[in-house]
Image (cartoon, rainbow, N blue to C red):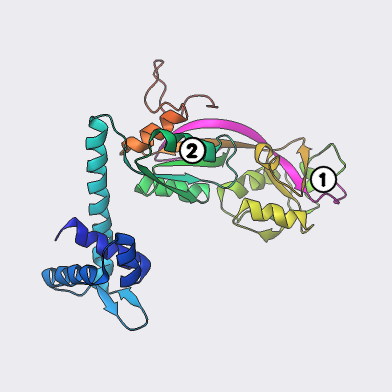
Amino acid sequence: MDLQQMRYVVAVAETSSFTRAAERCLVVQSALSHQIARLERELGARLFERTSRRVRLTPAGAAFLPAARQCLDAAERAVAEVAAAVGEVRGRLAVGVIPSVAAVDIPRALRDFRQRYPAVRVSLRVGASEELVEQVRQGAVDVAFLGLPATARPQGVDARELARDRLVAVVAPDHPLAGEPAVDLRRLSSEVFVDLPAGTAGRAQSDQAFAAAGLGRDVAFEVTNADFLARLVGQGLGVAMLPAAYARQLAGVTTIEVADAPIRVEHVIWSPVSRPPAATAFLDILGIPTALDPAGDAPGAAGPVR
């Protein structure tokens, strides 16, 4: 059993096709099929069910796949560590972001990183804050950018606070509130809302604020993406509350200050257990320290990083 065979298995599993897997691995299909068949003989079990229409994992293949991925990841980490020891950063970098991240210009940061470290392959994953925390804990994401209520902190990861921002009301340009300089939560509570799904960190900021004020509200539309949320608001389907720095980037909507608005805190997080050289290099590009500072503050205890 060798790493190349494991790469072939992972490629077939991810593409559900021997043809597409061979194209991804830059080999002829017959060579890929031969190596997988050889591995199956060595393991004494078939890894894939092959039909004329599709390819899928057998129970043995499903059991083998996670270990194969772990072996490939470990091999890549070993290569990256050796490269780092001689002053070269290479390997992979997985970055996770919430759609409404505003404290860091992610595209520009990735451009700067790519220019300095062209040998690193970068993957960008967009998701909810709670999902990204779990992915960093599991090692699937190296660095992630979150938005949380001021009462919450990322757990089980190293973190730095990036910025704090008040939420603002977002309404359609022709909404009756659009001409108001400011509103409060009591006035907003009579409106129909578009918001993120219940239980998510992005939704919790508003839910906690209304609950603390003893107010209820009607969330008629739940959406998983903040950009699409703004599109629904622009069509007059409801109002929303979003971080001010992010809301200013949106087109087709009007923002209004909220007198008693809750605070959203943005954090950058990484694993306290295993941080590949590429992750350290990326955080360095952003000017984010990843070790104890001279005053002895733990990661996550520092003030905002701009």
The residue sitting at 58% across, 34% down in the picture is: 103
Q: Disc number at residue 187?
A: 1
Q: Is residue 150 visible?
A: no
Sort mark 2 into few (<14), some (14-19) or many (20+) by Cα contacts within 10 Å.
few
Sort mark 1 into few (<14), some (14-19) or many (20+) by Cα contacts within 10 Å.
few
The secondary structure type at the circle numbered 2 is helix
Q: Is residue 92 left or right of residue 253?
A: left
Which portion, as a residue range, is magenta? 151-177
Q: Is residue 128 visible?
A: yes
Question: Which residue is more in the foreground, 214 or 164?
Answer: 164
Q: Position of residue 19 (x, y in %)?
A: 33, 71
The residue sitting at 76% across, 50% down in the picture is: 252
Q: Is residue 288 left or right of residue 85?
A: right
Q: Position of residue 233 (x, y in %)?
A: 74, 54
The residue sitting at 84% across, 45% down in the picture is: 178
Residue marked by disc 2: 111
